[in-house]
Amino acid sequence: MIYSDIRHFRSGFSGCRALRQALDFLAEKAFALPDGKHDLADGMVIQIRRYNTEPTAARRYETHINMADIQCVLEGREILYTQPLSKGAETTEDHLADRDLRFHDRLSDADGMPLTLLPGLFALLLPGDAHKPECYDGIKNCRKAIVKIPVGLLGL
């Protein structure tokens, strides 16, 4: 998991080409994109969506296997909890075949790290990084960009 400011991270980052492309796109174009799903290069996609944050207890931890997420709030503010997927976690819903998504039980927020996502801040979440996004932090109406990056492009 990486948590940083797009501008700060991009200025000193020269590593993975796919990650650099995704961050460049977020910084330069995502804020002006209409809501919806947009294809990027090499199988990457970006989803722009409006949503209402919810109380932490109403949200669920999720993980992905084939895709990494870059989550970046464009308007508003949310708390995103993250923690390594533990061996005690149970999969409660499995949508890997059609959406590369699993939901989990038995992960405690007390064991998670709360990250505040404000416009311009991002979290890169890799497979194995359980995360509970869109938790309320004083602002209900938000707009977010989620870049889905095939893990093969990251060299993992």
Image (cartoon, rainbow, N blue to C red):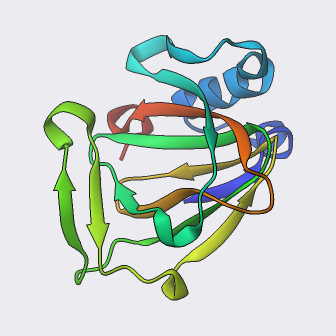
User: Residue 47's spot in the image, x, y percent?
Assistant: 53, 25
Q: How many marks?
A: 0
Residue at point 77%, 14% (across, down):
32
Is 50 displayed left or right of 68 in the figure?
A: right
Is 105 displayed left or right of 133 in the figure?
A: left
- Quarter where residue 119 is shown: top right
| 21 and 95: which is toward the camera | 95
| 33 and 18: which is toward the camera | 33
Is 32 situated above or below 100? above
Quadrant of the snapshot with the N terminus: bottom right
- Quarter where residue 127 is shown: bottom left
Is 106 situated above or below 102? below
User: Residue 9's spot in the image, x, y percent?
Assistant: 77, 45
Residue at point 26%, 40% (across, down):
100
- Quarter where residue 30 is shown: top right
| 67 and 135: which is toward the camera | 135
Is 76 situated above or below 117? above
User: Residue 104's spot in the image, x, y percent?
Assistant: 29, 66
Residue at point 50%, 72% (across, down):
57
